[in-house]
Amino acid sequence: MLSATDVYPPFGLRVVAGPIEMRGLTDELILELCDVAERGIHDPDEMPFYFPWSTAPAGELSRNTAAYHWSKRSTFRANDFCLDLAVLVDGRVVGSQGVAAKNFPVTRTGETGSWLGREHQGRGIGTAMRRAFCALLFDHLGFEEITSAAFLDNPASLGVSRKVGYVETGLTRVKRREGELARTRGLLLTPETFVRDDVHLEVTGAEAVRGFIGIGAG
């Protein structure tokens, strides 16, 4: 009989990099992620996301978070996907790290995005999980470049990107909250600029995910 991982290979993806562990988002892990989100991600006066999903009322935030990840499963295709993983430290979910890509078998590029529960910020976890995730993308999942972006008033995210080796590509003016103009800094990472800092990964389930995103065995 088929398993859930046979049908949806990201469930079987697991990455260990020192104290950081990343796993495919099963329903159980989604519920843990919802609990982290409900406890807070950022100061109410701040908004680090393009869409202000994190400001939803208690309860609704969990439903929205779960619905988002369920919807990304149902629409996952090699030519348009979001691969999101739960991030754990000492076996406890602390946030999420992911990448979105279109026409990946041709472009071999995608944009990373992540968040950490507020209680877990300021401990170096953000840098460690981004570095491990980028190593996974380059070394195991066939990516040839990785993009990202952050608002100019989000120095923590921009600082993580610089530490990992992303190069600035320009500024974009966008609408953030209703009626609010904000500027984002574009960023690009390649294997040549990637600052690995001796990151070592233990990876399981990557071959099945490679097939799922349309590039076959490495």
Image (cartoon, rainbow, N blue to C red):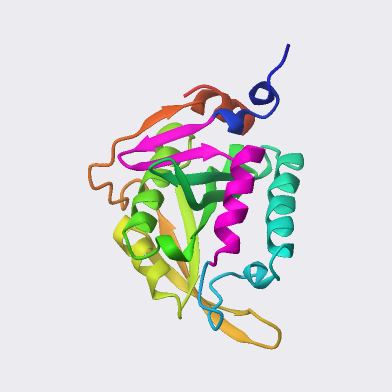
Residue 123 position in % (x across, y down)? 32, 60
Q: Is residue 39 magenta?
A: yes
Q: Is residue 118 left or right of residue 101?
A: left
- Note whether 139 is above or below 191 in the view shown: above
Asked if residue 214 shows in the view, the reply is no
Residue 98 position in % (x across, y down)? 54, 49
Point 55% across, 29% down: residue: 210
Comparing 187 with 52, the one in front is 52
Give the total number of marks visible in the rendering: 0
Residue 141 position in % (x across, y down)? 49, 34
- Note whether 186 is above or below 17 in the view shown: below
- Which contiguous range is marked in magenta? 13-40
Point 61% across, 86% down: residue: 181
Q: Is residue 44 magenta?
A: no
Comparing 94 with 114, the one in front is 94
Asked if residue 53 shows in the view, the reply is yes
Where, quadrant-wise, is the N terminus in this rendering?
top right
Comparing 47 with 57, the one in front is 57
Point 39% across, 57% down: residue: 126
- Note whether 68 is above or below 13 in the view shown: below
User: Quarter-wise, where is residue 155 in the image?
Assistant: bottom left
Point 28% across, 41% down: residue: 199
- Note whether 90 is above or below 61 in the view shown: above
